[in-house]
């Protein structure tokens, strides 16, 4: 018998250096995959934060501008067919009396105000003092949240509830999410060119110029709203302008 024929064939395998190289290459590949994954997750979270911030600010701005445009509005119906009747309608508009008229609060030297209150005929009865659905407002809270006032009960002749909180007459609700910090909210009167004003412009009805003594005038109300906010390391500012549709008649 040939003894050489009984020997086991040579077995091939990895050497220690080969195993070490394979291990290093495998770990490098896993590390590269994890790096790409973490970068993707971080980018996705950043986009979510930016989208959330943009949505909160722009949606709030659109709502505020749309609401302020309606300030002083009476219930729908046919307009008077004479100038005197039209003037009577404007001058007796109950949603523009001293209590219900659009008003800015907590203003600084640049005429930037952090709260606005206003009313319009939501319930359709031409009376701001019946029901509790005609008086509204927006303000920046101490917790850096933008808030909206709804369901406020206001008495005929005042006093005006203002921008403070009173459980009996005020319902303030958060308009922005907890994750979004509102760093600045301001509203101010402006002229047609966008310059800041301390009060609305009064326009002479007959010639469109500035109001003079003894003339019938309209208070033309143009407003600028600015909102700034942040979400962690991201921040942005949005600004909009609105012309209140219902001018206030000044006899």
Image (cartoon, rainbow, N blue to C red):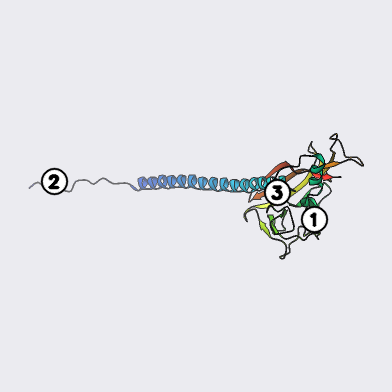
Determine which residue is flagged by label 1: 99
> Label 2, label 3: how many angstroms apart (C-alpha)?
112 Å
> Label 3, label 1: how many angstroms apart (C-alpha)?
19 Å
Disc 1 crowd rating (10 Å Cα; few below 14, some 14-19, many 20+) is many
Label annotation for residue 75: 3
Picture coordinates of residue 234, whole percent (x, y): 64, 47
User: Which of the 4 image quarters holds residue 163?
Assistant: bottom right
> Label 2, label 1: how many angstroms apart (C-alpha)?
115 Å
Q: Earlier in the sequence, mark 3 or mark 1?
A: 3
At x 79%, y 39%, the residue is 82
Determine which residue is flagged by label 2: 4
Determine the residue located farthest toward the front in the rendered image: 81
Q: Earlier in the sequence, mark 2 or mark 3?
A: 2
Q: Nearer the viewer, mark 2 or mark 1?
A: 1
Disc 2 crowd rating (10 Å Cα; few below 14, some 14-19, many 20+) is few
Determine the residue located farthest toward the top in the rendered image: 207
Q: Name the element at disc 3.
A: loop
Viewer-nearest residue: 183 or 175: 175
Label annotation for residue 89: none
Determine the residue located farthest toward the left in the rendered image: 1
Seen in the picture, residue 99 relative to 26 is either above or below; the reply is below
Q: Quadrant of the C terminus?
A: top right
């Amino acid at each position: 018998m040939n003894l050489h024929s009984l020997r086991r064939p040579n077995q091939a395998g990895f050497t220690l250096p080969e195993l070490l190289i394979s291990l290093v290459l495998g770990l490098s590949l896993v590390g590269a995959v994890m790096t790409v994954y973490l970068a993707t997750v971080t980018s996705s979270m950043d986009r979510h934060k930016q989208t959330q911030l943009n949505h909160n600010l722009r949606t709030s701005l659109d709502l505020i501008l749309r609401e302020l445009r309606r300030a002083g509005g009476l219930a729908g119906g046919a307009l008077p067919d004479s100038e005197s009747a039209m003037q009577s309608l404007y001058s007796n508009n109950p949603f523009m009396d001293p209590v219900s008229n659009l008003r800015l609060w907590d203003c600084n030297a640049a005429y930037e105000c952090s709260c606005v209150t206003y009313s319009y005929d939501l319930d359709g009865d031409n009376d701001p003092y019946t029901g509790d659905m005609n008086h509204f407002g927006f303000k920046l809270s101490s917790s850096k949240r933008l808030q909206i006032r709804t369901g406020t009960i206001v008495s005929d002749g005042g006093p005006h509830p203002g921008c403070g909180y009173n459980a009996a007459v005020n319902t303030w609700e958060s308009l922005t999410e907890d994750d979004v910090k509102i760093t600045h909210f301001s509203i101010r009167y402006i002229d047609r060119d966008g310059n800041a004003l301390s009060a609305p412009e009064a326009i002479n009805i007959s010639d469109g110029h500035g109001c003079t003594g003894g003339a019938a005038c309209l208070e033309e109300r143009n407003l600028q709203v600015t909102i700034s906010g942040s979400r962690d390391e991201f921040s942005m500012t949005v600004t909009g302008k609105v012309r209140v549709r219902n001018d206030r008649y000044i006899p």
